[in-house]
Amino acid sequence: MNARELKELFITFFVGKNHVEIPSASLIPENDPTTLFISAGMHPLVPYLLGQPHPAGKRLVNVQKCIRTGDIDSVGDTFHHTFFEMLGNWSLGDYFKQESIPWSFEFLTQKLNLNPKNLHVTIFAGDANTPLDEESRKLWLEQGISPEHIHPLGVEDNWWGPAGTTGPCGPDTEIFFDTQFGQPDIDFKTGCQSGRYIEIWNNVFMQFNKTAEAKLLPLTAPNVDTGMGVERTTAVLSGLSDNYLTPIFQPIIKAIEALSSQKYSDNPIPFRIIADHLRAAVFLLADGVEVSNKDRGYVLRRLIRCSVRQGKMLSINQNFCAHLGQIIINNASNFAGDYPELSQHQSSILTALEAEEIKFRRTLDKGLNKITQLINRQKSLSGTDAFDLYQSFGFPLELIQEELQKHNLSLDLDEFNRLKAEHQKQSQTLSAGTFKSGLADHSAVIIKYHTAAHLMHASLRRVLGDHVHQAGSNITADRIRFDFTHPNKITPDQIQQIESLVNDQIKAALPVTHQIISFDDAKSQGALFLAGHSYPEMVTVYIIGSPHNFYSKEICTGPHVENTRVLGNFKITREESAGSGKRRIYAILN
């Protein structure tokens, strides 16, 4: 079974259970300041998981494209990916465990024809605050899962959330496939680490609200959030223990074999890294991310540069990223979802890949010259020198060692690895919030900033022109960062005009309301929306002002304040370039 067939089965199954299919959101979160990328199907549904009614109802299903940077260092094995597609179904305060678990079992065993004896599941083992998830255990037993295939695990494995210190949270139950069915069972965690037991589906039961006093209070309307990895499940259904042998990746792998004159089976790790990273890069570029040294652009740069480094390890000395990018775009029919943005932005995607590869190859040449200079001057290369080359030039450790061997020199690996571990620890600490999978911060100050961003967007268009459209945003409890389309630097006079317009609307005490209407009606009524973003048939539109005499009208998931008078004083603190044809504004509320 290929990815497209899996998706169609999944969607059809849950539509038959009265779910409504919704489109995949962009990889760039619309209203979530806690993360750079959409890393799960639930991310675009944050306001609805917190209680806001969804335009499509209480039962939803889709395939969502995702990026997880936390797995970037694990890529190279048979089943980890930075970009992947996730099938998901949700209950927004409707059904719960009693329906979710039997439906999951039914889909796996009756629609995908998996042998129940080949499945393992995990449940929450309980802790000092919450007992063993006996309900899930009982439901799995009723489906026919044997007791020895039900594994109670702790908070670190089978408890979700809250994303911050407070909010929705609850146990989950994960479903695993035994890739060596028929062999004697082994310790479950050992089997997971070895790749024998592959997680293919996760059902999260958000049934509690954690208070500031760390109390767990039952939610009146608990939610179900599930996720099934397309790549892993496609491999399982094809009888493969390696995701990269599926049609999703094989055209890319075969192209790398042709470029390198090497076989995937002889040295699979660099093949996998290149295939994964460039697929992720193509999708990020298609969603408007530009290569840079900050935030999303830095992740994109890292993916492309790592691909080039792995290419050098395979002795690919020509530019190849754009060539593989074209193959990835051509291979889109083997992905689960429909992504017209790939072909729509094909030219700019390939141009960006080519430009970054050329730039990085020049950097690698500089690194090679630096190594030669250090060896000639010092007759050695310390672990610190090697790490500086690794960090500053992106020079692979393997290439550094190769150069040293030419001069009969060795490297102090202990020192290099110590410095690398320290750097990784700092990076993980820094990104713990930025890349966190979780519900957005919907504190009162965030909600105010979110509403102010709508006022600013409308004011930018009034001062600069209707060509202005949002091109990204990031809102924290300290400020708004707002990217928009505009070719020129904004003058001090224009900044003052924008500030005045926003503050005038705040003083006018305008009401903020919302309505659920069709996407076509929203467009015809002049509501702003993100270009290239996929929207469901019914959308939520937020209106600042009266419905017939509004100052701002945007398709948005919210939340917002009820009246602009609570916002305070709006002030633009900085304006700068955000790439070709884009500007960036930072603003605060006092």
Image (spheres, grey):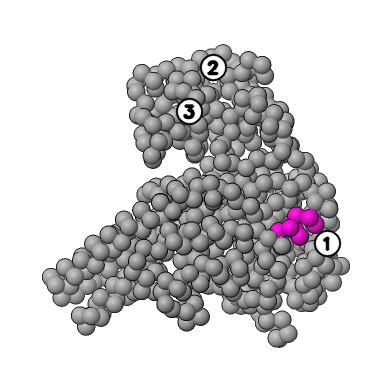
Task: Place residue 184 in its image quadrant.
Answer: bottom right
Q: Which residues are drawn in magenta?
A: 6-13
Residue 16 image offset from top left, x and y in percent: 83, 53
Mark 2 or mark 3, whichever is nearer to me: 3
Q: Secondary structure at mark 3?
A: loop
Residue type at mark 2: give it.
Answer: Gln
Q: Secondary structure at mark 1?
A: helix
In the image, residue 187 sits, relative to residue 434, either above or below, namely below
Does 502 lie within the magenta span? no
Residue 428 image offset from top left, x and y in percent: 45, 57
Q: Pointer 2: what residue?
A: 505
Number of labels in the image equals: 3
Badge 2 local density, few (<14 within 10 Å), some, or many (20+)?
A: some
Badge 1 local density, few (<14 within 10 Å), some, or many (20+)?
A: some
**Residue drawn where x is 53% and y is 46% of the image:** 344
**Residue drawn where x is 69% and y is 40% of the image:** 536
Q: Measure the C-alpha gap from mark 1 to mark 3.
A: 51 Å
238 or 45, which is in the foreground? 238
Task: Determine the residue located farthest toward the right in the rendered image.
Answer: 142
In the image, residue 124 sits, relative to residue 436, either above or below, namely below
Residue type at mark 3: give it.
Answer: His
436 or 255, which is in the foreground? 255
